[in-house]
Image (cartoon, rainbow, N blue to C red):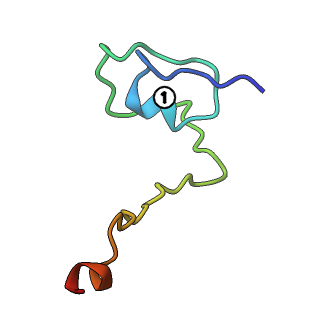
Amino acid sequence: MTEKKHFGINKLCRRCIRQCKQPDSMVMLDCPRFQPRPFKSEELKFKQLDLFDKKSEDE
């Protein structure tokens, strides 16, 4: 499956399943054809890995 690039697509259009995408330079407050995606993509929050163990520093 190819991954679509969202560069230059309006923020509201990115969240819509329809194909009528508008450019990023266009300001849209509302769209009559807006159909939200049936799922929500969560932002993954990663914890930073400790490179040096705190116990080894104390020794």
Where is residue 52? Give x, y as percent. Answer: 32, 68
Name the outermost residue toward the front: 59
Where is residue 41? Give x, y as percent. Answer: 56, 52
Answer with left or right where residue 37 lies relative to residue 31: right
Q: Look at the image and tell me whether residue 31 can be seen.
A: no
Q: Look at the image and tell me whether residue 18 can be seen.
A: yes
Where is residue 46? Give x, y as percent. Answer: 43, 61
Report the amino acid beneath label 1.
Answer: Cys
Badge 1, how many Cα within 10 Å: few under 14, some, many 20+?
A: many
Q: Nearer the viewer, residue 45 or 47?
A: 47
Residue at x-position 54% and y-position 35%? 34
- Residue 37, quarter of picture: top right
- SS assignment at label 1: helix
Residue bearing the label numbered 1: 13
Q: Is residue 44 above or below residue 37?
A: below
Where is residue 50? Give x, y as percent. Answer: 35, 68
Name the outermost residue toward the left: 58
Q: Is residue 9 above or below residue 31?
A: above
Answer with left or right where residue 58 lies relative to residue 26: left
Residue at x-position 31% and y-position 80%? 56
Residue at x-position 51% and y-position 57%? 42
Count of marks, rendered view: 1
Quarter of the image for the N terminus: give it.
top right
Quarter of the image for the C terminus: give it.
bottom left
Answer with left or right where residue 10 lies relative to residue 14: left
